[in-house]
Amino acid sequence: MRLKASISISLLLLPLLGIAENAQDLRAGFAIVDITPPLGIRMSGYFSERLASGIKDPLLAKAMVLRQGDTAAAIVCCDLLGIDETLTRDVRARIEAERGIPGDHVVLTATHTHTGPLYGDMQRFFKDDPDAEPDAIETQTAAYEAELRDRIVAAVAEADAAARPVQVRHGVGTLDNIAFNRRFYMKDGTVRCNPGKMNPDIVRPAGPVDTEVGLLHFSDAAGGPGALFTSFALHLDTTGGTEYSGDYPAYLQRFLREKLGNDLISFFGTGTCGDINHIDVSHNEPQKGVSEPERIGAALAEAVIAAEPGLRPVERPALGIARAVVEAPKRPYSDAELAAAKETAKRLREGKTPFLDNVHARRVLHLAAAPGDTVPLDVQVVRLSDDAAIIFLPGEVFVELGMSIKKASPFATTLVVELANSYPSYIPTAKGFAEDSYEVVSARVRPGWGEEMAEAARRLLYSLK
C-alpha cells in the first residue's frame, strides 16, 4: 500500500476507534422518511437523459442509531443511485452538532436504484455545455438536495429518540440463481459486459457470484419485529422507465412485513456487485419491468425467512466503529482526452456517440472536476459484537473483493456493503482491469487499488476483533 494511504489509515484509525467499555445494553432506534423528489428532474443510472414522470413506489431513507455506553453510530440506507461526497460531509457535520454522534461514526449508503434522482455533479454530463452555469433542472434539483439533507438528519434524530434496548441475532442465508456475473469471456478472446441473452459467442462467466445473504435481526425485549438488515450482492437495475422506484428492496420490505409484521423496517445494504446483475443469459425471456423486481424481492425474502431460525444471538454486544481513508491515485488523462470528453458531452443528446465513448467521457469529466491527485476511498466498520460486524465500502466494487474481505474476516458474520459515503464509480479487481470492458472504462482509480482497499478493510476488521 502506498505510503500516503498507510499514513492515512494509521492516523485515522486510532482517534476514530469507538469501543464500549462495559457490558451495558446495546440500544437501537429505527426510522423511515420519504425522500422522493419532485417530478421533472433528471433520473439516474443511464447515459441518456430521463426526466421523472411519476412514482411507482416512494423512495425512502432508513436510519438506524446504535448506542452502547458512550459509543454511538448512525447508519442511513437511502434509495439513491449513489451517495455524493458533499452529502456525506454535510450530514455528518449536522448529526455531530445536533445529536452528539461523531461524524466519523455516521455512515450513508445507497441502494443503487436506477430509478431515483440524478443529483450532485453528475448532472453536468447532460447539458449541452458541461462547463455552463446550472440550468433550470439543476436549480430545481439543488432545492431537493437541501431538503434531502434535512430529511436524512431528521430520520437520524427520530431513530435516536426511539432508541431502546435490543436483542440482535446474526447469520447468513443462501440465494442461488438470482444473481449472475455480467462479464463474460468471449470466443474472440475479449471480455464483454452484458453481451446479450443466448449470445453464441459466450464462453463462460469471467468471475464468480456471491450467493450469501448476510443478516442482522434487531428485536426489542418483547421480541417485536424491530428491524432486519439484509445484504446481498445484486445490482439494482431491474425496473427501468421514468417512474421513481426503490427497485427490488422495496418488494423485499413488502414481503418481509407480510411474514414478520407490518412494523418491521427492512434495511438493505447492497453487497459488492460491480460485476453482478440479474440477467440470466441462458434464456430469452425478458427481465425488466413490473414483474422482475417483485420476483427478486420475493426470492430474497424467502431466503431471509428460511435463514431466520438459524440466526445466532449476540450474547455480549460490544459496539465499536473504525474508519480509514485510502487515497487511491487517479487514473491519468490528457488535455486531448478532456477536450474530447467535453465534445462528447455536447453530442450526448443527439444519441450518436458510441456507448463506451460516453463512459470514457464521463470518467474524464469527473476526474477533471475533482480536486487533488487521488480518489479518497472511505472505509468504515461497525462492530456489534465479537461475532458480527458490517463493513462499508465506497463505489461499485467487484464481487471478488467483497468475497475476499469476508473470507479474511475474523468475525463469524461479516456483512460487506458497497456504495457508502461517496461514489468513486467502479472499483474493479486487478484482473478485471487487465480484461477491460465497461466497468474498467468507467473506473476512476488505477489498477490494484481495489485490492488495497480490501486490505484496508481487513486491517480495520482485525483492529476491532
Image (cartoon, rainbow, N blue to C red):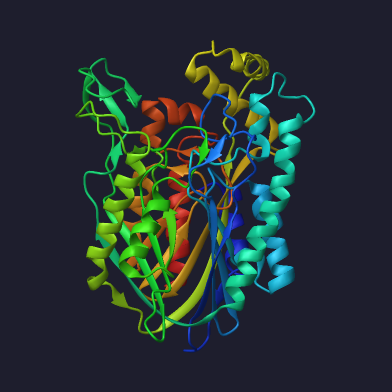
The extreme right residue here reads 133
From the viewer's side, name the closer residue of 398 and 152.
152
From the viewer's side, name the closer residue of 213 and 259.
259
Could you tell me which residue is drawn at 30 percent across and 37 percent down?
181
Image coords of residue 307 (percent x, y): 24, 65
The extreme top residue here reads 352
Does residue 67 show up?
Answer: yes
Image coords of residue 279 (percent x, y): 30, 34
Task: Count numbered badges in the picture.
Answer: 0
From the viewer's side, name the closer residue of 224 and 331.
224
**On the image, which quarter does residue 322 sit in?**
bottom right
Q: Which quadrant holds the C terminus? A: bottom left
As drawn, is 403 to the left or to the right of 343?
Answer: left
Q: Is residue 100 above or below residue 22?
A: above
Could you tell me which residue is drawn at 62 percent across and 62 percent down?
11
Image coords of residue 411 (percent x, y): 35, 68
**On the image, which quarter does residue 274 sit in?**
top left
**On the image, which quarter does residue 225 sit in?**
bottom left
Q: Is residue 254 above or below residue 137?
A: below
Does residue 412 show up?
Answer: no
Image coords of residue 13 (percent x, y): 57, 65
